[in-house]
Image (spheres, coloured by chain):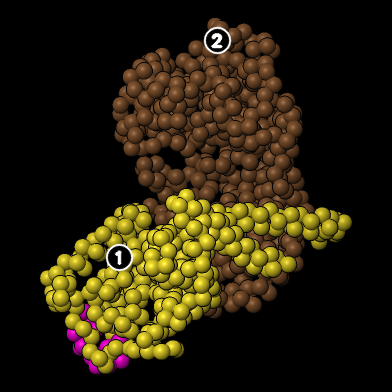
Chain colours: A yellow, B brown
Amino acid sequence: MTAVRRVLGALVAPLVAVVAAMAITSIVIMASGSSPGDFWEVILEPPADRTMVNIVNQTSMIFLSALAAAIGFRMNLFNIGVEGQYQVASYAAAVTVGAAFVPGLLNVVLGLVVAMVAGAAWAGIAGLLKVTRGVSEVISTIMLNAIAVTLVGYLLNTYGIRAGNSLRTTEIPESSQLAGFTPFLDRDGSIWTLSILAVVAGIGFSFLLNRTSFGFDLRATGASETAAVASGVKVNRMVIISMMMSGAIAGLIWMPAFFGAAHTYGSTFQFQLGFTGIAVALLGRNRPLGIVFGALLFAFLNEQSNRLTLLTDISQNVVQITQGVIVLAVVVAYEVVRRRQQAAEQNAVKRQLDAAKPSDDKAVTA
Amino acid sequence: MNASPTASPTAATDAIQVRGVGKRFPGVIANHDVDITIRSGTVHALIGENGAGKSTLMKILYGVQKPDDGTLVVGGEEVSFGSPTDAIAHGIGMVFQHFMLADNLTVLENVVLGAEKIHGIGDAARRRIVEISTAYGFDLDPDELVEDLGVGERQRVEILKVLYRGAKIIILDEPTAVLVPQEVDALFGNLRELKAEGHTILFISHKLDEVLAIADDITVMRRGTTVGEAHPGEVTKRELAELMVGSELPTPEKTASTVTDEVQLEIEGLTLTDAFGRDLLSGIDLTIHKGEVLGIAGVEGNGQAELVETVMGMRKPTAGVIRVGGEDISDWDTRERREAGIGYIPEDRHRHGLLLDAPLWENRILGFQSREPASNGFLINRSGAREDTQRIVEEYDVRTPGIDTNSRALSGGNQQKLIVGREMSGNPVLVLAAHPTRGVDVGAQAAIWGHIKKAREEGLAVLLISADLDELIGLSDRIEVILRGRLVGEFDPQTVTPQDLGSAMTGGADEPADDQTQEDRA
């Protein structure tokens, strides 16, 4: 009974949010003098083969980013620094893999390890500052984002290779490039091999949080720090570990694109994934399954909106309004649903107790 | 009675009349049949143990809670407060025990914050603050940063805040709890000035010396209701203490003692100092044997919570040694102590005992993250945790639709039964029980006591903190009294009288001579 209600509750909120977002986007488009019909026609059209491939690839990267944010969120740590963490990590990995210290697939593994370590280290700075100096992780991670952009830009400027009028790192050897899987024609592109990282990370996350005692500690700390302390959780240690785990996953965000298509850190680097991840984590309630749908929705909207400028007079950026409203609406809707469920549960307990009243005397003497 | 020059003590000028007020929360009756008359221009003291219902009453007076029944008359007018704003509009201001000041703002900024409409935020406001400050001898500089102020000065800022908002009736919640004796004297000076200007003060405390020194009238609360009124000239500290704790003591059940010779918990010279260098615990020595329940009696706030949290490893003592079963555990962290078999029934179950938005079976894991049946140290054992939760629900009669219900949905008593059941699991060697039956109905209380007694027979050592004398005397093999972080007296529950306990708890006996004279002077 309660299980059914919980599932329904989890579904109602995002659906309401999407409907609200569609309504508000339509109003905005109308206000700007265009036709919402045109907009939805383009967005809701069945995606072309090529677009589908892109959606899958983007979903995997957004998913990783949201997962990175979610680890912190589950512990009430607001890691806003996923953006900076994956920039630093991507650059570090690109340099290492480009240098080709080891051959072939081993080089790929090395690249992933370097990316995770670099991301973890960058995030760890914020964790350390919080634990030793009481600096809010929100502030420090935002600052670290800015530092990351500058640092990577500086390194690229100093050590990068000039290609055309931009700079990049050394291209990785062909033996370390992962072509991916081509479901349609070659010209439609391929699904990057390392998109699988999203699946692995998602399952790992779910297992860690729900099945291990470390995961329980993490969730308990997020739910009530005082109760966690009383139960024997060392909160400072948890802050640093979970911050670093968040950073490690952030390090993986761009890896599918890097090994699958870019092969170098340069002008093809995709920014902003870190911020998209925060929104998607909120949308998916910090649960892997929810995040899958959130990531898919965001990737879908992004890719479908590409043709807006081509086919209509509506700006592609309108889709960001849709995404923004979805997140806002979903936060509100979750809260409403949560309160209703709480009240319903309390009533259920009360009914149960009232029904059990006649047996009270027995219980007292027991 | 030296009432203010502007008000004469007739019924028409009673500042506040509380008539038959009651307030219930799910599973708990916080207040019932409360009657108080506070005369205008007096200092009225409200005393009682924690849990006696003072804070609920206070919240009702300040509009934070709405009473379920009874009436509230302020200045001759029947009122119903929907929020503190209504209370302020009727001239009632409140100074909380924990200051609500922004450290990095000046006195002026703190005072006008949220009251910008009264005198603006500029020179007019500054003038008014200086005016109030001089009138009552507060000696506050409006442009000084609050972080540079001492505790006594911060408290005066809080009082200034309510005066600035036009309060004629000021409620002070345990204002002396944070002050050193000199500051208490200064505060009392301020209060007398306020009274002389026609303000009415409701002073909440459980320190009898202070109440006798400052109050014009005293109302005593016990178990949610008002049990008596007194006037300082006509009552002794001892009589007040008796009113507070109740005069009838239960006769302990004559069961065979299960106390053994084997020492389970040994504490030597335990001292805990807070950030301001004040001793919260000083030189605590105590021993609990296997099969023994040691009860700690004392007015709340005298170090009980700190003692328990230090033994649990949640606070780091400044000095002292803790041994469990002969082993020195002073350097162990909380988890290691739990694994060694120390159970913890916390005073504040919502903050320290439960994950409110997690189902019951997940709450069973809390504190057992590394132990059977909830875990194998690395992986959570869901079925093990669920089965054992089911066992607790049955054995401890936790009223719930099922173990998948969130613990928030349960009543306080049932939450407590779950916690007691959990902490008694896994054959603990020592249980620290802080108010194990507070807010629990009578039936459940008897059941919890039964479980503690049974475990004691099997050799469990229990450190019992309680404000309920029935519980202390009924369960304990020995009672120690704690006062200002020191153990000040040991009693045998078979022979102890309420007078003994009352005076030891309130500092009427066994007190260092210098403290005594200081307070008597006050």
Q: Horizontal and vertical percent for residue B366?
A: 56, 65
Check the residue under mark 2 and report the chain it is in: B
Instruction: Give the amino acid type for the residue marked by disc 1 in the picture.
Output: Gly
Q: Is B237 drawn above or below residue B55 in the view shown? A: above
- Residue placed under numbered mark 2 in the picture: B4
Q: Is A256 drawn above or below residue B261 in the view shown? A: below
For the point 68% across and 11% down, which residue is it?
B12
Q: Are marks 1 and 2 in contact (CB under 8 Å)?
A: no
Give residue A193's quadrant in the image. Answer: bottom left
Q: Is residue B450 left or right of residue B521?
A: right
Total numbered labels:
2
Crowd tier of the residue under label 2, counting other residues whose Cα lies within 10 Å: few below 14, some 14–19, many 20 or above: some
For the point 61% across and 71% down, which residue is it?
B426
Q: Residue A84's mark?
A: 1
Q: Horizontal and vertical percent for residue B333?
A: 44, 64
Specify the principal SS of the magenta part: helix
Of the 4 image quadrants, the one containing the N terminus of chain A is bottom right
Give residue A104's quadrant in the image. Answer: bottom left
Check the residue under mark 1 and report the chain it is in: A
Q: Same chain for marks 1 and 2?
A: no
| Residue nearest the viewer, comparing B476 with B24 | B24
Provide the residue span drawn in magenta.
A95-108
Q: In this view, does A193 lie to the left or right of B367?
A: left
For the point 87% across and 56% down, which residue is it?
A358
Q: Horizontal and vertical percent for residue B128?
A: 39, 17
